[in-house]
């Protein structure tokens, strides 16, 4: 992180001559990764936003903030990311990248450009826009942020519509299904693996009986399976998933 207000968008550089392989939409930075609250966006796109807890504390924050800018949300979800302008793979404003997915002859290529970057002491991430030749048109943002209590979250935002031209346009309904699968992977990509203490049968049983929605794993001890330990009396650390706060919409505006 480089400063409290280190935020830039492609809109700051308006007037740059357009390129033939430039953005396939006209509102770069519309996902507003620097803003905690996402206001109204451009019309005609399918809008999506969701936030999940991925960790707690300084170590989790530093690890996640570094990972998000290295495209680890995409990489850990089965995509390859390569810089196309010799600028390195770390996300940077105006950086152009080629994202690929799929095996061999079924590889799908997604040309993109980073249109906004935020890097502060409590918020870190970027947004990238689709370039001509991408299967869809729009923008996606990955943002890691933390609150005053040290809870670290990942927010995913996207604006999507059919590509303006090309063979992918008629396959847009199928691409939306693939997008939903990818989103589920994105939201899990930066979650810190549970510690040994969080994996313990006692902690898992405590969370299951509290109604948190986290299932207890089978235990070899038949008594532990029936144990009910009140949350306030438990020495187990809170689960990262217990405070997951999804907020999503997928409407055309």
Image (cartoon, grey):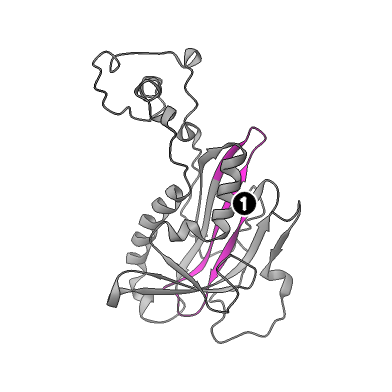
Q: Secondary structure at mark 1?
A: loop
Q: Toward which corner of the image does residue 180 lie, by quadrant?
A: bottom left
Residue shown at 62%/39% (left/top)?
Answer: 58
Residue 79 lies, in percent from the top left, at 41, 64
Residue 152 lies, in percent from the top left, at 57, 41
Label 1 sits on residue:
38
In the image, 145 versus 20, the foreground residue is 145
Residue shown at 36%/13% (left/top)?
Answer: 228
Residue 142 in sight here: no
Residue 217 in sight here: yes
The residue carrying pointer 1 sits among few (fewer than 14), some (14 to 19) or many (20 or more) residues within 10 Å by Cα, namely few
Is-magenta flag for residue 127?
A: yes
Q: Height in image: 210 above or below 188?
A: above
Residue 76 lies, in percent from the top left, at 42, 56
Q: Toward which corner of the image does residue 91 lie, by quadrant?
A: bottom right
Residue 175 lies, in percent from the top left, at 36, 66
Q: Which residues are magenta?
A: 125-153
Q: What is the tally of numbered marks visible in this picture?
A: 1
Is-magenta flag for residue 147?
A: yes
In terms of secondary structure, what is the magenta stretch mainly? strand
Task: Single out the residue that lies furthest toward the front.
Answer: 196
């Amino acid at each position: 992180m480089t400063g409290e207000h280190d935020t830039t968008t492609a809109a700051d550089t308006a007037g740059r001559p357009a390129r033939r392989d430039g953005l396939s939409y006209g509102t770069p930075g519309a996902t507003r990764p620097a803003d905690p609250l996402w206001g109204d966006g451009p019309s005609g796109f399918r809008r999506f936003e969701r936030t999940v807890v991925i960790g707690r504390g300084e170590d989790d924050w530093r690890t996640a903030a570094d990972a998000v800018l290295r495209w680890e949300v995409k990489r850990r979800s089965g995509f390859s990311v390569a810089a196309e302008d010799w600028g390195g793979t770390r996300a940077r404003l105006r950086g152009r990248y080629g994202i690929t997915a799929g095996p061999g002859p079924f590889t799908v290529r997604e040309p993109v450009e980073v249109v906004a970057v935020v890097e502060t002491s409590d918020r870190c991430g970027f947004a990238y826009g689709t370039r001509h030749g991408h299967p869809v048109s729009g923008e996606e943002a990955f943002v890691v942020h933390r609150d005053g209590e040290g809870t670290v979250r990942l927010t995913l935002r996207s604006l999507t519509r059919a590509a303006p031209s090309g063979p992918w346009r008629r396959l847009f309904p199928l691409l939306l299904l693939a997008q939903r699968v990818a989103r589920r992977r994105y939201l899990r990509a930066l979650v810190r693996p549970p510690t040994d203490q969080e994996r313990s049968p006692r902690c898992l049983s405590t969370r299951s009986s509290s109604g948190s929605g986290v299932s207890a794993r089978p235990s070899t001890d038949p008594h532990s399976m029936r144990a009910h330990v009140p949350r306030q009396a438990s020495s187990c650390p809170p689960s990262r998933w217990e405070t997951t706060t999804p907020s999503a919409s997928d409407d055309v505006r």
